[in-house]
Image (cartoon, rainbow, N blue to C red):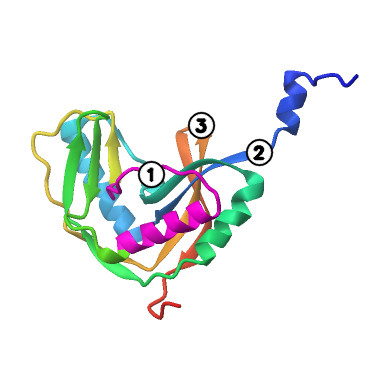
Amino acid sequence: MARAGTAQEQRLTAPRTARVFFALWPDDRVRDALHFHAQELHCSCGGRAMRRENLHLTLVFIGDVAAGRLDDLTSVADAISAAPFEFVLDQTGYWRHNRIVWASPLTVPEPLRALVTGIEGGLKQAGFEFDQRPYAPHITLLRDARAPAILSPLGLDWPVRDFVLVESARGARGAEYRVLARWPLHADQR
């Protein structure tokens, strides 16, 4: 009769998982401007400003994935055909229900919608479950913030030339994001 392993043995043999999502990862210029704006807002809203290195725009949140399936995510992204685009982060807002101050475009560019739709379609086809709510592109600037008296417009141009797969892990300072892979967007779509 086979014995059941102890909890410790089961943890050691359990497959490793990674908490992942596809995102747009800003360059230093965009990241610096977002971080500066977050610091300005922090003065009136309090809360916790997102660390500069964690600023991003989520495309599709997937969640926990067995490490053995990360190659499948890479294959999904490899099949994406999308053109580079530019958009403007021209508004900031506040969600009272979760006390988040965010930045977003007033108008979602069609290439951004197409990129998200392409990733979601590939994930469905590959059998992945993911967060399937209406897409509201935003960059979280502050968490646990008070409602701001005034939200100043941002007006930040962001040329998007690629997208990334990111792993989120718990670290000493909270969530730490690590780019696992990057895919360029090509003007000459396949």
Say which quarter of the image contains residue 7: top right
Q: Which residue lies furthest to the right in this view?
A: 1
Kind of residue at badge 2: Arg
Asked if residue 180 shows in the view, the reply is yes
Q: Name the residue under label 2.
A: 16
Q: Name the residue under label 1.
A: 132
Q: Mark 3 points at which residue?
A: 172
Nearer to me, 176 or 164:
164
User: Magenta residues, as a range?
Assistant: 112-138
Q: Mark 1–mark 2 contact, CB under 8 Å?
A: no
Q: Distance between the residues labelled 1 and 3?
A: 30 Å
Q: Distance between the residues labelled 2 and 3?
A: 20 Å
Q: How far apart are marks 1 and 2 (CA)?
A: 24 Å
Q: Which of marks 1 and 3 is nearer the N terminus?
A: 1
Where disc 1 sits, the SS reads loop
Above or below, 100 relative to 74: above
Left-right relation of 51 to 174: left
136 part of magenta stretch? yes
Q: In front of the other: label 1 or label 2? A: 1
Q: Mark 2–mark 3 contact, CB under 8 Å?
A: no
